[in-house]
Amino acid sequence: MHLLGAKQCEIQIQVLNPGSSEVACLGRRPAVVRAWKKKESEKPSEGDFQSITASDHEEQTGPLANPESLAVTAERSISLARVEYGEIILEYSKGEPYPVVVPCPGINLWVNGNRRTEPVALTKEDVIRLEAVNEEREGGWHLQVSEDGMSAVLHVRPKLRITREIVDLPPSNHLHIEVKEKIEKLPPVSLEEIIQELNKQGIIFGIDWEACARAAASCHEEEVIIARGRPPERGQDARIEFFFSLNEKVPVISGDAGRIDYRERFAFTSVDAGTILARKYPGGPGVPGATVKGGVTAPPPPQDVVLKAGRGVALVNNGLEAVALDTGRPLLLQNKNLSEITIYPGLVHSGDVDLSSGNIAFKGDVLIGGNVNERMNVEALGDVRVAGHVAQAMIQASGSILVQGNVLSSILVAGGENAFIQDLAPLIDNIHKQLQLLLRAINQLQGNQAFKTGDLKGGIGPLLKLLLEIKFKNLPQMVKLLKDLSRNLPEQLSGEKLIVLVRSLEHAFISAPLSIRDCKELHAMKHGVGDLIDRLTSISGQKSDILLKHALNSDIRATGSVKVVGTGCYNTRIVAGGTVEVERTFRGGEIQAGGNVYVGELGARSGIRARIKVPWERKISLGHVHENVIVQVGDRQFRFDREEYGIIMRLDKEGNLINRTH
């Protein structure tokens, strides 16, 4: 202000270059301004212009906008160039460097008729012309069919229309020209051209006309699928459906959510003979496809599978079904497209039967490598072999049972339901015979002239009661025993008919014999017992044996033979359809056999009670027998009152029980 000899309020200031600042003032460029007195009537000439530097200037609203904070210093004048309305305007200072103009892409800078593309210094005498260059860039498109002929893709790149405008720039001694661009994108192809190209390439199938219209209007670079073929549909592959679990055992889901029996946690996979194990469903042909050019593509052939029958399995229904020929565990062997099913007759359980394994129920043989522990059950339709002990457990087998360890407080049943029949059949047969004799006795008494028929006007009840008290004392006891045994029968042996029959027998011979009116009721009971005998006879089958070393407080039943090869039995009951052989000791309990019986030592010096019973045609052999032992052959029995050796008990031809030493 002191250079112009004026006050701050008398000065007009114009910013020519705002300058720049860097961190810590490094590389700072001072701002350049023009200043003149406001009282002058005309704009100051170039020679009157003064250069003022504002070191702290950032922008016009900064220090230069506040006159009080503006520090102005006089510098020497410089030559400048600026752009206004698309023209370059030069301002010169005598003796100073010429201003330099730097052209940019998108404009043409003409100096003295020559187009300049590099920075150029301009003088007052130069003829300068600046023009913006508008531009159009061609787009592109092409239609491509995929190698498999299943799609036609239109690749589009839009046409570009670029309009440029030169930007006004403030004065500078090094002026960089700038332009503004406006870019307009245009579709490169019309719908008619697309249709022509489709016809040219022979594309006739699966054309998407909406996609064609969208591609014709597209202003973006993209790929548009405008035709799609129809892929061939694969045929139905052959498959096999299996009707058994592929696992050795499967979890059992309990219906009672509040109660869980951990002994019934698993069911071991097994099947019966005649069970359908698998069914094959043949494959079906597929549907041909079509390419965008109308070509036909064949579907891939359906995959086939082979169902093969191994041991214990047969193929039926033209090889489409696999059926089990044997009872056992089905095993599946698969190799690629081959499935072979085999029936393995046995189940091998290497450990103990306990809560971790659950009970075992298997339709075949069972081999147990450990023990059968407390309250566990093993059921098999084949044989059962236990390598360890059986303690407070139950083993039921349709086949034979072998226990290599001890049997403690357990139940062994070999022969399945037939083991129960052998207990029941003799009893029912005796009841049937007693009924026949009873009816015969009643008929004889009614036909005897000495008998007073007037005493039977109320029915035959009094006569029946009299006969039961005098001649048929055992019949009520037999009926009571039948009632007790029938409670433990398997479901297939019990039923409503048996329950009604037992109730009728109990009513007639135990609770109310006087209520019987006539013999028709007794004949009906006799026929009912005869039908039951027929049922039991039809169920009886193969003979199954039991072999063990030692038994204590146990119940042993077998339809075949029972053999004890170890230390013997204590307080044990043995029921066998065949022979019974105890090589060493049988102390306390009962043996009931359908065949001969041999015991090394029967009873004890303490006089513990033991009993053996066999049919009339069989014999009992005893190596050593103690007192208080009872043996029975047929309906004849004998009690030993002293210790004896080498005893053979049997009936002679007259039915007398004879004791023969050997």
Image (cartoon, rainbow, N blue to C red):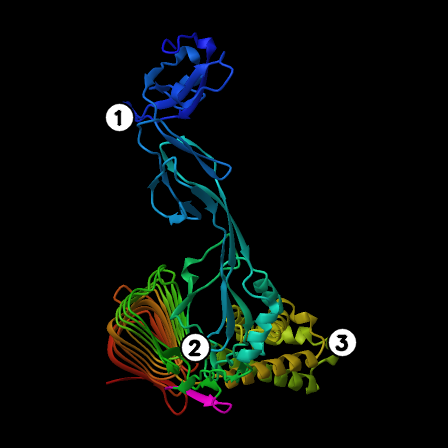
Q: Quadrant of the N terminus?
A: top left
Q: Secondary structure at mark 3?
A: loop
Q: Which residues are magenta?
A: 310-319
Q: Residue at x 52, y 77 (%)?
A: 231
Give the image location of residue 179, x and y in percent. Answer: 46, 43
Q: Mark 2 sits on what residue?
A: 419
As shown in the figure, which amino acid type bears the numbered disc 2? Ala
Q: Residue at x 49, y 87 (%)?
A: 320
Q: Quadrant of the C terminus?
A: bottom left
Q: Nearer the viewer, residue 375 or 581?
A: 375
Query: Looking at the image, do the residues carrying marks 1 and 2 touch, with CB atoms under 8 Å apart?
Result: no
Quadrant of the rendered structure where residue 556 is?
bottom left
Where is 15 relative to 527, above or below? above
Is-magenta flag for residue 314?
A: yes
Is-magenta flag for residue 162?
A: no
Relative placement, left or right, of 505 versus 98 is right
Tag on residue 26? 1
Q: Mark 3 sits on what residue?
A: 457
